[in-house]
Amino acid sequence: MTRGRFISFEGIDGAGKSTQHAWLVGHLRRHGRTVVATREPGGTPLGEKLRSLLLAEAMHLETEALLMFAARREHVAQVIEPALNRGDWVVCDRFVDASFAYQGGGRGLDWGKLQTLTRWVLGDLQPDLTLIFDAPVAIAQQRLHAATANPDRFEKEQAAFFEKVRAAYLRIAAENPDRVRVIDATRTPDDINKTLEKIIATF
Ligand code: TYD
């Protein structure tokens, strides 16, 4: 049995990543792949409960990071590893890079602490491919405000926070050129679909 493939989607809020996530899942299924479409925080019943807390309740930044990783531990054990072992493709809307970008970059949590949690929770597991949807913060904020009636705790953050999150994502991309592709998310959805199609065809 060949191990499945693991793709994660990342980007600041409003970059349009969730629309593209849904498109890629459909594209892979149309091409005969068995796909597990999932998301973080969440992806399991317990993880979805933790998501509700994380998106609504004010908390210490280390509590926030620990709950993200607690949800992730459950997700890896219950969903991601079993799917990859069955040979399925896992397409995840956000994964561990979001913790480095948001808790590390955005909130300023020590990168080393995040690396310790990553080793603990993931061991050797990492996505085979990570797509970072990148757009200037002003554009992402405009899209977010147009599309979101009730912003959550993260979506309510100011532009300066998202500048730091974006910079952290770009740092992650620069440090992991074999795994990470940065997608220019200012283009039309159709153009982005074509880019994704090409990336997947040679992946
Ligand atoms: P998001 O994918 O933006 O959900 P939606 O599109 O439904 O609004 O994810 C929710 C938020 O969680 C997002 O603002 C980023 C945040 N987040 C972190 O801060 N750290 C993490 O490790 C993860 C996975 C998400």
Image: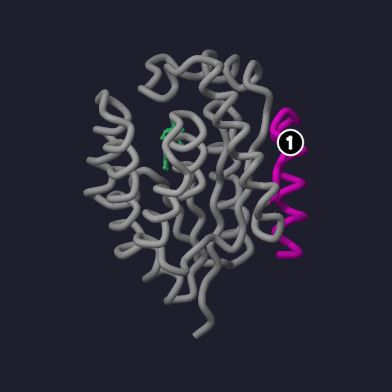
Please tell me in which quadrant of the rendered image residue 186 appears.
Answer: top right
Instruction: Name the amino acid type tagged 1.
Output: Asp
| x then y, percent, for residue 117 | 37, 54
Side of 154 relative to 139 (left or right): left
Residue designated by label 1? 184
Residue 145, relative to residue 4: is it above or below? above
Which residue is at 70% across, 59% downward?
Answer: 200
Q: Is residue 94 magenta?
A: no
Colour pattern: one colour
* Crowd class of label 1 (few under 14; some 14 to 19; many from 20; radius 10 Å): some
Which quarter of the figure is the C terminus placed in? bottom right
Which residue is at 60% across, 52% downward?
Answer: 130
Which residue is at 60% across, 31% downward?
Answer: 166
Please tell me in which quadrant of the rendered image residue 64 appears.
Answer: top left
Magenta residues? 181-203
Q: Camera-side residue: 106 or 70?
A: 106
Residue 24, relative to residue 82: is it above or below? above
Q: Is residue 202 magenta?
A: yes
Please tell me in which quarter of the rendered image ligand 1 is found: top left
| x then y, percent, for residue 102 | 47, 34
Which residue is at 45% across, 18% downward?
Answer: 157
Side of 35 relative to 151 (left or right): right
| x then y, percent, for residue 87 | 49, 75
Label 1 CB, ligand 1: below 8 Å? no
Please tell me in which quadrant of the rendered image residue 57 appears.
Answer: top left
| x then y, percent, for residue 53 | 24, 33
